[in-house]
Amino acid sequence: MKTIEIKTTQNVTIEYELATLWERFLAFLIDALCVTVVYILLSALVLNNLFGDMEDVNWVLSVVVALPMILFIFYQLLSEVLADGQSWGKKAIGIKVVRLDGQEPGLSDYLLRAVFHFVDTFLSVTALAALFISSSAQRQRLGDMTANTSVVRIKFSLRFRLEDILKINSLQDYEPEYPEVRRLSEQDMLLIKNIISRYRKHQNKAHKQVVEELVARIRQQLDIAEIPRDKIAFLKTLIRDYIVLTR
C-alpha cells in the first residue's frame, strides 16, 4: 500500500495511505449516480417545459450533453467545500482530499480539482485520470497536481493523536521527561518516527535490532544513563517531548 507523509501546521507528521485507483473509481461512480438522479429530476421538472417548443435541435442537444458535466463539476466543488474534501462518493468509500503541504484545502484548491474534471474525466472518458493516478508517485490526476492535493484513506498513522498534542498548550500542562531532546534535529525525529512505523508493521528480528541500535545511539548522544525497558515507548516519549519543546 502506497503511503505519503504530510507535515501539519502543528509540525506533526502524519502518514496517510493513498487511495487506490479502484477506490477513487468507485467514489466517482457513486458521485456520477448522484448527479444522474439530479439531472433526471431537473429534466423532468424544468428542461422539458423549457425546450419543448424549441426548433433548434442542435442547441437543445448541446445543452442536454453539457448540462450533466456542468452539474457534476458544480456538485464536486460544492460537496468537497462543504464536507471538508469529501463528496458523497468519497464518504461512502472512506477517502478524502488533502493538501500535500499540510495546509487545509481551500476554495481555490477545490475549484481547480473540479474544473480539471473537464480534461481528466470527460474529454478523455476518465482514461487520462486513470493513467495519471496509476502512474504518478502520489496518485494524482491533473486536477490534483495543479491544486497540490491528493486523495487518501481517512484512516492514518500518527504517533500521537493530533487532538492530544493540541491539548498540550504549554510546559505547565506537560512536563517533558527528556528536555535534552532539543539536541536532536527535526530530521532525527522523522527518522525515529519512520523506524517506529516500520517496526510496528514488521515486528521481526531485523527491525527489532534497528530499534535497539537507535535507542543505544540516542542514549549516548543525549547522555541518558538509564536504559529504558520499553524502547518503543521511550521513542514515543522523545517525539512528544520534542514537539512540546520546539513548537
Image: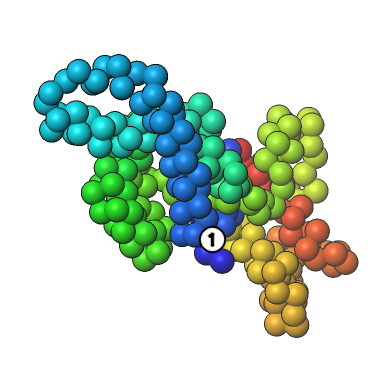
Side (left or right) of 81 relative to 233: left
- Where on the picture, by quarter, is residue 8? top right
Secondary structure of residue under mark 1: strand
The residue closer to the viewer here, 182 or 239, is 239
Asked whether residue 30 is in view, the answer is yes
Q: Position of residue 74 (x, y in %)?
A: 37, 29
> Does residue 207 lie above or below 222 as drawn?
below
In percent of the image, x 42 and y 36: which residue is there? Answer: 36
Q: Position of residue 193 (x, y in %)?
A: 64, 59
For the residue carrying disc 1, how many other residues have a C-alpha within 10 Å: few (<14), some (14-19), or many (20+)?
some
Side (left or right) of 131 relative to 209: left
Which residue is denoted by mark 1 in the rendering?
Answer: 3
Q: Position of residue 196 (x, y in %)?
A: 69, 64
- Where on the picture, by quarter, is residue 232? bottom right
Side (left or right) of 114 relative to 29: left
Q: Position of residue 102 (x, y in %)?
A: 49, 42
> Does residue 231 lie above or below 70 as drawn?
below
The residue closer to the viewer here, 170 or 225, is 170
Quadrant where the C terminus lies?
top right
In percent of the image, x 67 and y 64: which residue is there? Answer: 197
In percent of the image, x 26 and y 17: which residue is there? Answer: 50
Mark 1: amino acid: Thr
